[in-house]
Image (tube, rainbow, N blue to C red):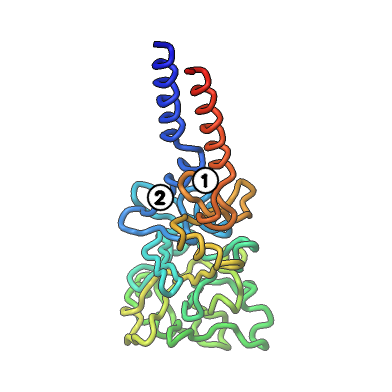
Amino acid sequence: MTSLFLITSFFSFLALILARPSFAAVRANSCRSYCGNLTIDYPFALDYGCGHPGFRDLLFCMNDVLMFHISSGSYRVLDIDYAYQALTLHDPHMSTCDTIVLGGRGNGFAVEQWRSTYFNPTPDNVFMLIGCSAQSPLFQGFPGKHLPCRNVSGMGCEEYYDCPAWSLVGHKKVGSVFGSGPPECCAVPFEAIKAINLSKLECEGYSSAYSLAPLRVDGAGGWSYGIRVKYSVQGNDEFCRACEATGGACGFGSDGVTQLCMCGSFNSTTTCDSGSASSKRTWSLVVALAGFFICMSM
């Protein structure tokens, strides 16, 4: 009777050990892969510890709406194009062809310095700054110094002035001509000024549009309004590909830097094929307990 009890107890304990998920397994399975109708894949993630460390604390899912948060504010994510490594963002306080938003309420676009190596607006994204003061850093040295205002991928203020929204704010073209004062609208590529900060630039508002070449449209009414951001993964991207090839999910450690391959029951600093010291220790414990119970039953 005692032997039967010990053997039954052993196998019950063994089943408990094998069925009990480790912390690593719970963490690996908690990586969300969607928000609303948008897929969340590497290098992005919604949960801390998942994805690439350079993209941590970046995306948030609120009521099935995916939000992108950086130092300049929060933006709704309209699309993530993994093939071209680009995101499309929406700022509700950004001007379009139908609405001019003033009062400096727009987010603009500015990222933390450490994030700037991972993403920035695409070269074919134009930012049109509206109602900037004569003292704006944009116009330092005006009129002797040439203004940074110029078309980007065929998009600029001259076409934007034809939008119906300008008639609602009383647009006067006298200010749009260089030499007669700062223009009401100044179109710039992001690389020209590195940050779109309405307060520092002393501007009342802004608009942003991007071009999806080779598609060309006539007139600002047909432009795609939003912020198109190009992202890139710095460092050892081969690590993630090797991890996923062995059935793992890419993540990072508690230090926010070290890349990890999450393999369900354990985390690895290489791939899931490398095994786990913790799983080996578990089996060693099982073997030891098996010997103990067998000896006790004899």
Label located before the other in sequence (1 or 2): 2
Identify which residue, 215 or 195, lies in the foreground.
215
SS assignment at label 2: loop
Q: Give residue 212's quadrant in the image.
A: bottom left
Amino acid type indicated by mark 2: Arg
Q: Residue at x 35, y 72 (%)?
A: 165
Residue assigned mark 2: 32
Up the image or down, 35 lies above or below 194; here it is above
Up the image or down, 158 lies above or below 274; here it is below
Q: Provide residue 115's location: percent of width, then percent of height.
A: 60, 63
Say whether residue 74 is visible.
no
Identify which residue, 298 or 69, lies in the foreground.
298
Q: Which mark is residue 226?
A: none
Identify which residue, 180 or 292, lies in the foreground.
292
Q: Residue at x 48, y 48 (%)?
A: 47
Left or right placement of residue 288 versus residue 39 in this view: right
Q: Provide residue 273's location: percent of width, then percent of height.
A: 51, 56
Q: Which mark is residue 266?
A: 1
Count neighbours of disc 2 (C-alpha within 10 A) and say few if under 14, some if 14 to 19, many if 20 or more: some
SS assignment at label 1: loop
C-alpha distance separating marks 1 and 2: 18 Å
Count neighbours of disc 1 (C-alpha within 10 A) and say few if under 14, some if 14 to 19, many if 20 or more: many
Q: Provide residue 192's location: percent of width, then percent of height.
A: 60, 79
Q: Give residue 195's quadrant in the image.
A: bottom right
Report the number of numbered marks.
2
Say whether residue 267 is visible.
yes
Asked if labels 2 and 1 touch by Cβ distance under 8 angstroms, the answer is: no
Up the image or down, 248 lies above or below 195; here it is above
Amino acid type indicated by mark 1: Phe
Q: Which quadrant is home to the N terminus?
A: top left
